[in-house]
Image: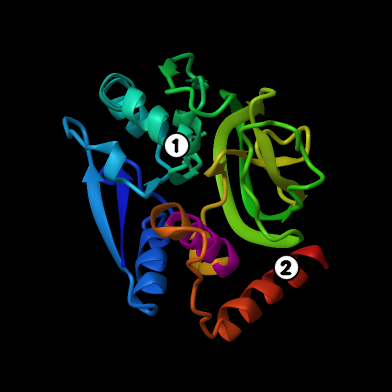
């Protein structure tokens, strides 16, 4: 089996090792005999979104976002929005997350257009929100579970660990659900305890880390969702030995909650 992943603006948007998310997806696929084909999408690229099973958009500096914003909006927004509506699996971190919303008003007053596939907007603040973060993902309890479009399901009660560093405060509209509740750290805006947004099979959040190597449950959930969308709901993922990953995750959660 093969999956195709679009990597958005990796040359401008890749901080705190966000590329590690792709390495993790690729390796966890390879261990199961699944090939993950990665298509880089940079300024000027064209891509057939219909052939993409997954997309990844990492974080970046405000200046990096400014460099890619117009290209992203003009060249990719239509195809990407269609793919998201059709259930493509997407993960966007920090600056990438901000670009999926309606807009990002930076702390210097520059208004960058977002593509609006997530019903969120972001406003830069003077103080950066920095530190380790733990999110408890209880999708059945947080946000609106009644959205007809919201078909995303993580196993409940996962404590996702990561690291955040952002000036942007992201505020949710009614069209997204929360990925989780912040147990440690600032989360989307440092005010309402919300950590990350979900719409269909698209997730945006502030967790660098890299996120997926630290949280293998989420990595496998993304792979499984993409596989079942492409090859049918009876496809299952062969289990892997996650002993070390889960131990590391547990240690961080315990240390940060102590
Ligand atoms: N430039 C954005 C901010 O500071 C995103 C930073 C990031 O991706 N870590 O809000």
Q: Which residue is mark 2?
A: 253
Q: Is residue 155 above or below residue 193?
A: below
Badge 1 or badge 2: first in the primary sequence? 1
Q: Which residue is mark 1?
A: 86
On the image, the x and y values in percent for residue 155 come to 69, 61
Main secondary structure along the magenta-highlighted residues = helix
Residue found 39% across the figure and 29% down from its top: 82
Q: Is residue 103 magenta?
A: no
On the image, the x and y values in percent for residue 228 come to 47, 58
- Between 15 and 211, the residue placed more toward the observer is 211
- Between 240 and 248, the residue placed more toward the observer is 240
Q: Quadrant of residue 12?
A: top left
Q: Quadrant of the C terminus?
A: bottom right
Q: Quadrant of residue 251?
A: bottom right
Residue found 41% across the figure and 67% down from its top: 24
On the image, the x and y values in percent for residue 150 come to 64, 37
Q: Badge 2 local density, few (<14 within 10 Å), some, or many (20+)?
A: many
Which stretch appears magenta?
216-226
Q: Badge 1 local density, few (<14 within 10 Å), some, or many (20+)?
A: few
Q: Quadrant of the N terminus?
A: bottom left
Q: From the viewer's perspective, is 21 left or right of 184? A: left
Q: Is residue 256 visible?
A: yes
- Between 101 and 134, the residue placed more toward the observer is 101
Q: Is mark 2 within 8 Å of ligand 1?
A: no
Q: From the viewer's perspective, is 215 left or right of 92? A: right
- Between 135 and 123, the residue placed more toward the observer is 135
Is label 2 in a helix, a strand or a loop?
helix
* Mark 1 and mark 2: Cα distance apart in space: 34 Å
Q: Is residue 100 above or below residue 88?
A: above
Q: Is residue 9 visible?
A: no
Residue found 32% across the figure and 52% down from its top: 5
């Amino acid at each position: 089996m093969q999956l195709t992943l679009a990597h958005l603006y990796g040359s401008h948007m890749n901080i705190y090792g966000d590329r590690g998310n792709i390495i993790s997806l690729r390796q966890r696929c390879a261990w199961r005999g699944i090939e993950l084909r990665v298509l880089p999408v940079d300024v000027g690229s064209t891509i057939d979104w219909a052939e993409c099973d997954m997309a990844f958009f990492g974080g970046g500096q405000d200046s990096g976002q400014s460099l890619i914003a117009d290209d992203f909006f003009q060249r990719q927004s239509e195809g990407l929005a269609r793919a998201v509506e059709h259930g493509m699996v997407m993960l966007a971190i920090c600056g990438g997350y901000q670009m999926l919303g309606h807009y990002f008003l930076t702390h210097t007053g520059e208004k960058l257009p977002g593509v609006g596939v997530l019903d969120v907007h972001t406003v830069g603040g003077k103080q950066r929100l920095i530190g380790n973060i733990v999110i408890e993902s209880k999708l059945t309890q947080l946000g609106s579970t009644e959205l007809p479009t919201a078909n995303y399901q993580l196993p409940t009660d996962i404590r996702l660990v990561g690291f955040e560093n952002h000036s942007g405060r992201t505020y949710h509209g009614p069209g997204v659900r929360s990925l989780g509740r912040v147990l440690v750290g600032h989360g989307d805006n440092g005010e309402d305890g919300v950590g990350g947004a979900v719409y269909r099979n698209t997730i945006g959040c502030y967790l660098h880390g890299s996120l997926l190597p630290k949280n293998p449950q989420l990595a496998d959930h993304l792979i499984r969702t993409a596989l079942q969308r492409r090859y049918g709901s009876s496809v299952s993922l062969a289990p892997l030995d996650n002993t070390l990953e889960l131990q590391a995750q547990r240690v961080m959660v315990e240390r940060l909650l102590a």
